[in-house]
Amino acid sequence: MSSIALARRTDFIAEAVHADAMPTADQLKREATQETVLSPRFYTTDFEALDRIDVALVRDEWDGLMREMEADPNRYHFKKKEKFDGIIERLPPALRKEFIGFLVSSMTSEFSGCILYSEIAKRTKNPDMKRLMKMLARDESRHAGFINDSLKDAGIGIELSFLTKAKAYHYFSPKFIFYATYLSEKIGYARYIAIYRHLEKHPENRFHPIFGWFENWCNDEFRHGEALALLIRADPKLTQGINKLWIRFFLIAVYTTMYVRDHQRPELHNALGIDITQYDYEVFRICTEISRQTFPLTFDTDAPRCRQLMEKMRGISERLDAARGKPGLGARLTRFGCTAAAGWTFLQLFTMRTQKNALPQNVRLVPVW
């Protein structure tokens, strides 16, 4: 569990002859198939358990949201209105490297969601689940394809279908799928809207046109999160008893992963004019306010102790990165020590006092921004 913050950042252009060379499509394929704790993963689940899900408790809200999603308000939005050709190639090498890494990671994450949702839609007999999952797969496929089109304009697009065979699949029970994807969608919403609003105030920092689509993107993410929240609210047991510990785990895992990963891309955030630490805690604040509508507990991410431990986790990850690939007993001891320190730090975060939250009676969710 503690290794969530410790995966080595893959340097996918290290094989290039010159530091300022563009990566090849094959190098990006290898990056997309990397299995690290920070990298997006592909999942499978218990399809028979999904067949037994009943949304009767939230039926009115569920049907209203399904009609909204079926209307597909973003169906015409993910069309390029600006020419993307040559933009990535002209970026400074360090920024280009991090930006491409950001695009590949985002695309892989979107596509992994598409594959999971498509598989559920195909295999479940539950009409409510089938109805939802088809629309989630539709949106995630659209997002992944749009990112890939941006890479294609730089001559480094990826044939996404190869990922279905190249990536390992990991089993998650349905409730873990709900917790993880709910938080993923909501923190995605918070990230996209925070960047979009920032660039509205500072358009000079929009170094690539794709950021102009983040508002529509975050609207999709928010609706996806709403649907998953309703699935959680449809079964009160998912927010009671031992499941509160699982909620606590996923909150800490998602927040620490984001904090460590974002700090691995300083050039990207500098180009956007964003202070990474301030941005991350703003995203945590938005995500916390949203999750109050679904989860019975929240973390005070502004607490000095929380910030101290998050920064400690980042430092451990950096030391582990520096020791990776080095031979000798000393390097092995360093790696072992870092892993143990990360485990202890994660446990300290996990055992921090949480804030109790009384769930609202009205389960129809509203945006927080």
Image (cartoon, grey):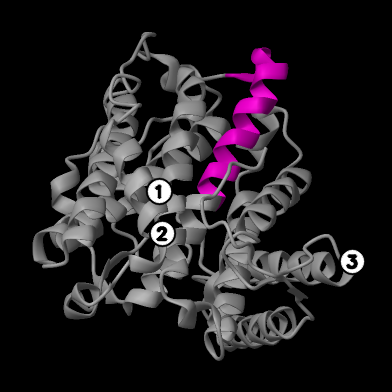
Residue 97 seen anywhere in this rendered image of the structure: yes
Q: Which residue is mark 3?
A: 304
User: Which one is in front, 355 or 311?
Assistant: 355
Label 1 to label 2: alpha-carbon separation: 6 Å
Residue under label 1: 224
Above or below, comparing residue 156 to residue 200 in the picture = below
Front residue of 337/363: it is: 363
Main SS class of the magenta portion in the image: helix
Q: Mark 3 and mark 1: span between their CA atoms?
A: 32 Å
Left or right for 98, reference 64: right
Q: Identify which residue is drawn at 75% across, 51% down.
A: 281
Q: Do the CB atoms of the residues marked 3 and 2 lie less than 8 Å apart?
A: no
State whether residue 123 is above or below residue 23: below
The quarter of the picture where residue 320 lies is bottom right
User: Marks 3 and 2: which is nearer the front?
Assistant: 2
Q: Amino acid at mark 2?
A: Leu
Residue type at mark 1?
His
Q: Nearer the viewer, residue 316 or 229?
A: 229
Report if residue 35 lies within the magenta region: no
**Residue 228 numbered tag:** 2
Residue 280 x, y percent position in the rendering: 70, 49
Q: In this view of the protein, can residue 12 be seen by the observer?
A: no
* Rendered position, 101 above or below 193: below
Q: Position of residue 82 (x, y in %)?
A: 39, 8
Q: Is residue 65 left or right of residue 1?
A: left
- Element marked by disc 3: helix
| Crowd rating for badge 3 (residues with CA inside 10 Å; few <14, some 14–19, many 20+) | few
